[in-house]
Image: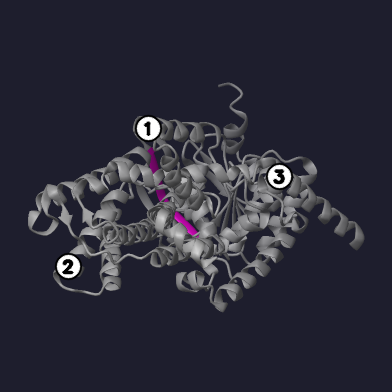
Amino acid sequence: MSGATLELQNVAKHFQGVIAVDSVSLVARQGQVTGLIGPNGSGKTTTMNIITGLYPADGGVVLLDGVDISEIQPYRIASLGVARTFQNIRLLPQGSVLENVLLGAHRHQNANLFDVLLRLPRLARSENAEVERCEQLLSTVGISHLRDVAVGGLSYGDRRRVEIARALATKPRLLLLDEPAAGMNFAERVTLAELIADIRDMGITVMLIEHDIEFVSRLADHIVVLNFGREIAEGTPAAIKTMPNVIEAYLGLEDA
Amino acid sequence: MIGLFEEFLSSYGNVVDLCLLNILLAYGVWLALSGNMFTLGTGGFMALGAYSSVFFTTQTGMPFSFAVLIGGLLAGGAALIIGLPVLRLRGDYFMLATFAFTEVVRVIALNWESVTGGAIGIVGIPRYTETWQLALLAIAAVYFAYALRHSHFGRSIAAIRQDDVMSQTMGINVLAHRLTLFGASAFVCGIAGAMAAHLNFFIGPTDFGLLRSVDALSYPILGGFNALLGPLVGAIFTTLLPEFLRFSNQWREILMGLLVILVVLYLPGGAMSLLQSDRLARIFRRRLIERHSIEQRAES
């Protein structure tokens, strides 16, 4: 599969007078890892919710491979190849790891309601094919051994992996990761970084929201910095770190 | 043996019919509940199925099976029409809207005298409904519920019930799923209404009111809607209990009300959750993990 290019032009979102995203323009290029960083409340997650259609934008356009998706419903955006994970992990705690990942495969099931209700052979064929594909994804993210374990009892890091596997099960062209490294220890972060690099090598465009500038710098080809709902800087990781306004946003002005 | 069975049916036939009918109804309501829709429209959908099927069998001489099917389709169609605006409502508001629908149907039944017989209702309906037909429908309902649960649709519906925002981002069309469930629920309730009408010789506007809707809602909740047989257990239990409490009409309703409160408070998963208690599940899971680690050690 080949990745998609995402472009945001002057995207805005207000919540009853509170400006969450003022005006954001950015490009996530095909097959690259784009980092989206910024302090708390700078509008990173709101931007992601606009891209995936959960929030309608108040202004601006979102283009996926040049097609405007800003007025499209979330499930249709997902079927165009946009997948995501959530900052506050959203899994079904009682379900097993495999069941959770299979949820992402829903739209690739060939069996229709008729096949399901009469239990025709196509149901088993479709289900077996998707189970096999999801099992491969479990091994991609390194949690094959947890296949039948209920998600509720897993560690934080493993639950994040389940979410990534579930997002990959939708066969995305663009994968949005919302603070995937939050709450992880050093060793977990290293394996996560390897996993994200693997995903990029599959050809999937990755957009990585992060708090931790060091973690993004190791992975991203390109970084966009948000503050107060606007992009204040963009460029390569090395260039970003020396920009005065980025340092100011992160560390604060000395004399202020 | 067969003699005994016939003897049993002749003395308890009514109760058996009622149990089977309520099982059908329970799975109808379960369909809506599984999509997080606490519907009070059951009475209204039953009334649509009942009145329309009686009209077709008595006024046009249509075969019974066709009339029942049309009754179900009419109810399902009505659900699809009211579903589009109503499904945007959440929780209490959805309940109120479906309750309003049941009331509207009741008021129409009360006033459209040429078709529904008004307050007096329709008397002398031929008794076409047979026990085996009800049994067949009940078995079909359990089977379809089983098939649905053990498929990707079942998984998606469970996901929608727990987190519809996340489900949308997985490419699941939440509104279409819920609308289909609501329509299917009404279809089953319409069929149950048509079967009920041809069982009792008589239907009137009071047969399909709020009480009927609440009763039907209590079947899967009492039995447990997470278990395949939960609605069945709830329906049988709720139908049989009043038979044992025949000695006092007042006590019957008080006890039923008390029971619903107790189950909701102390057994939110319904009666069937007693069988699949958390402790059992935990032990089972620990076994699975152990087996995995053993397998892994064997591999390495």
**Foreground mark, 2 or 1?**
1
**Residue A201 vertical placement versus B238 (above, below):** below
Helix, strand or loop at disc 1? loop
Residues beneath discs 2 and 1 located on the same chain: yes
For residue B296, which quarter of the picture? bottom right
Residue B67 relative to residue B119: left or right: right
Residue in view at x 50 percent, y 31 percent: B262
Measured from the top left, where is residue B31 in percent x and y? 43, 55
CA gap, disc 2 to disc 1?
37 Å
- Position of residue B64 measured from the top left corner of the image (x, y, whole percent): 27, 71
Labels 3 and 1 touching (C-beta < 8 A): no
Residue identifier under label 1: B248
Q: Nearer the viewer, residue B203 or A41?
A: B203
In the image, taking residue B111 as reference, residue A58 lies left or right, namely right
**As displayed, is residue B152 above or below residue A254?**
below
Q: Amino acid at mark 1?
A: Ser
Q: Earlier in the sequence, mark 3 or mark 1?
A: 1
Task: Say what amino acid the circle numbered 2 marks.
Answer: Thr
Describe the element under mark 3 as helix, strand or loop.
helix
Expressed as whole percent of the image width and height from the top left, the position of residue B58 reads: 17, 67
- Residue in the picture at 44% in, 30% down: B258
Residue B58: mark in rendering: 2
Does residue B38 appear anywhere in the picture?
A: no
- Prevailing SS of the magenta stretch: strand
Determine the CA span between mark 3 and mark 2: 54 Å
* Pointer 3 residue: B280
Give the quadrant of the C terminus of chain A: top right
The quadrant holding residue A70 is bottom left
Q: Which residues are magenta?
A: A5-14
Three-letter code, disc 3: Leu
Snapshot quadrant of residue A74: bottom left
Alpha-carbon span between mark 3 and mark 1: 39 Å
